[in-house]
Image (cartoon, helix red, strand yellow):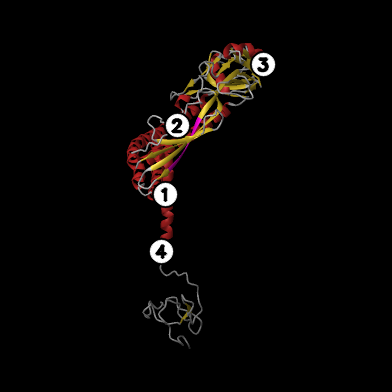
Amino acid sequence: MSDDNSSNNWDNSSSSSSGDEWSGSDGDSFSETSHKSWFEKIMDSLKAILFGLLFVVAGCALLFWNEGNSAKTAAALHEGAGQVVSVSSERADPANEGKLVHVAGETKAANPARDSEIGLNANGLKLSRKVEMYQWKEEQEKETRKKLGGGEETITRYTYKREWSDRPIESSRFRETSGHQNPAMPQTRSRSFAAEGATLGGFRLDAQVISLLGSGDTFDVPASALAGAKKVFGERASVAQGAIYAGNNPDAPVVGDIRVTYTLLPVQPVSVVGKQIQSGFTPFTTSNQRTVLLAETGIKDAAILFKHAEDANKILTWILRLVGVIVLFLGFRMMLSLLEVLADIIPIFGDIVGVGASMVALLATAVVAPVVIAMAWFFYRPVYAGLILAAGAAIFFGLRYLSALRRQPAPAGLSHAQPVPFGGQQGLAGGSIPYGSGAQQAPPPDQFGRRNPQQGVQNPGGQQGGGSFLPPGFGKK
């Protein structure tokens, strides 16, 4: 059972805590110590097995889906690159209606980009607004210590800092809410405003295309925007340091202060690949029902735009592969957590089993992840998968063939021994072997210095094989 040593009397807490007084300064923190029995750890590990199984299923599903998504996107880009037609930006030719076209040229904006809420205008293709509020943020750091008998003690340190954030941080979920309440963010939030009437030569540029061009550079808010800022953020609003600030002192912000900054995408050359509809662009639908709509700043060839899109697809694919592998590993590790808990009666044994469980989880991930990816390739890219499999098989059998050649014995009668002069053969240990000792050696020459090629050699038993030596003096007249 858990020990309840809490001095703050928090609901459902089995902990003792100690910490700083809440002074309202950055770096406020306190520590909380909680205890968990061996039985409670076993129950948690049983739950972890179920969650681990769900993680494994989710990891496999993500890996399989990711390969399919990558393959479909790559196929769509390949199809689009084969159909795109580069056309002049001067006018939209009706003959290209419905085709995938590539247009590059100078842009214009008939009207400035406008933030109508604040009444701020800027000459450019897109004006982006970022609204931030100074808020409390909670950070946690945990240290777990195992105890003899299977229990454990966890020390959690909560640290509270203040920072600018363009998203609301829910302070009601903090471990200690006293002195760390965040007010509600204003309804005016971050968003982008595309210039109306923007054109690329004789083509229209709508908000969907402009949104693909990036955010642009920092834009300093002019003093003329002050009146609109006060209508939205109240009388505390001011224009300072190139931004709108709602608070008493922009150099010393307090929780609840508002900061609004802008970026502007200027009028500049642009390159677009999309389906031509009258004088505008819309996503082009490929045969696999994927869409192609590409846009970048600068004058660029269609091949460059497609290359960048293909690179982005590859990067996303590898990121999601890594996420899937991590989810798989966590799933297998959670499924094996019970083994570590059972061994935790003696902490050092639990640590050893934990390391082994992590290695097993890593090995299982290394096996399952490639198998799932391979199955996805067979499903989505059977031709490529078949070629890779054939190449792998060829390499495997080729290595086996080379290995078999190296293991074949040398032909009979061939020896790697160096020739030695008659009268003694160099032995394995460096000594000489006299002629006639039964070792395999060449016969002596006759008195004319000749050797009979038909003469055999002595076998290990000392018997002559294949013929006899000519007697001395044979052939004299």
The magenta segment: 138-144
Of label 1 and label 3, which has the lower sequence position?
3
Q: Which mark is residue 222?
A: 3
Q: Decide which of 469, 153 is in the foreground and name it.
A: 153
Instruction: Point out the frontmost of discs 1 and 3.
Output: 3
Give the residue pinned by disc 2: 71
- Residue 210 visible from this viewpoint: yes
Q: Secondary structure at mark 1?
A: helix
Q: Mark 3: which amino acid?
A: Pro
Q: Is residue 369 magenta?
A: no
* SS at badge 2: helix
Marks 1 & 4, CB-CB < 8 Å contact: no
Three-letter residue code for mark 2: Ala
CB of mark 2 within 8 Å of CB of mark 4?
A: no
| Mark positioned earlier in the residue sequence (2 or 1) | 2
Q: CA distance from mark 2 to mark 4?
A: 50 Å
Q: Which residue has dot 4 on it?
A: 409
User: In the orientation shown, which residue stands out farthest toward the front?
Assistant: 7
Q: Earlier in the sequence, mark 3 or mark 2?
A: 2
Q: Residues within 10 Å of mark 3 (few under 14, many from 20)?
A: some
- Sequence-first disc among 2 and 4: 2
Q: Position of residue 308 (x, y in %)?
A: 55, 30
Percent position of residue 391, x then y = 44, 44
Tell me which residue sits at (43%, 34%) in the image: 7
Q: In this rendering, is residue 384 above or below 224?
A: below
Q: Are marks 1 and 3 in contact (CB under 8 Å)?
A: no
